[in-house]
Image (spheres, rainbow, N blue to C red):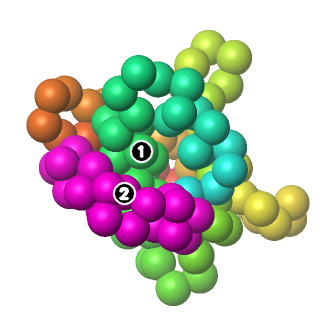
Amino acid sequence: MILGTGIDIIEIHRIQAAIERWGEAFLNYVFTPVEIDHARKHKFPYPHYAGRFAAKEAIFKATGAPQFAWHDISITNDSDGKPVCVHRDPDFKLHILLSISHCRDYAVASAIVTS
């Protein structure tokens, strides 16, 4: 059963500007170590940060944000490269389907929450 949907789009340069201005403080506030490691593996990491930022925002919208903080969820990839939401609470019962994409200027993500 679908319980909620969410979508978010962000300009990649906004994430890049935040990282350049606040550095590690911003990264560590918004992203988990796994997400930071993933982005840093790429020559140009900003689209990857922006995609994960958009994914978290889409999840917040789909679930009704108050029950989540930035570090409650980590966006990883499965063995096929598909984005996956991992909640830090092992008893978390919702299933979240994610899609993330980016181009030169924008990153977008959608989330569908099912029971």
Residue 108 seen in render: no
In magenta, the rendered stretch is 1-30
What's under tag 1, amino acid-wise?
Tyr
What's under tag 2, amino acid-wise?
Ile
Please state if 35 lies on the left or on the right of 64 as rendered.
right
Crowd rating for badge 2 (residues with CA inside 10 Å; few <14, some 14–19, many 20+) = some
Q: Which quadrant of the structure image shows residue 71?
A: bottom right
What residue appears at the point 41 percent right and 21 percent down from the top-left corner? 43
Residue 18 lies in the magenta stretch: yes
Percent from the top left, x then y, of residue 111?
42, 49
Task: Give the main secondary structure of the magenta stretch.
Answer: helix
The disc label shown at residue 19, or none: 2
From the viewer's side, name the closer residue of 64 and 41.
41
Percent from the top left, x then y, of residue 63?
49, 70
From the viewer's side, name the closer residue of 9 and 47.
47
Q: Is residue 19 above or below residue 41?
A: below
Percent from the top left, x then y, of residue 96?
57, 49
What residue appears at the point 59 percent right and 44 percent down from the top-left corner? 35
Please state if 91 lies on the left or on the right of 108 as rendered.
right
Residue at the spot of label 1 = 49
Q: Is residue 102 above or below residue 1?
A: above
In the rendered picture of this protein, how many numbered marks are placed on residues? 2
The disc label shown at residue 104, or none: none
Instruction: Check disc 1 and report its element: helix, strand or loop.
Output: helix
Quadrant, the C terminus:
bottom right
In the displayed orientation, state which residue is furthest to the left: 105
Residue contact at pointers 2 and 1, CB within 8 angstroms? yes
Q: Which quadrant of the structure image shows residue 67?
A: bottom right
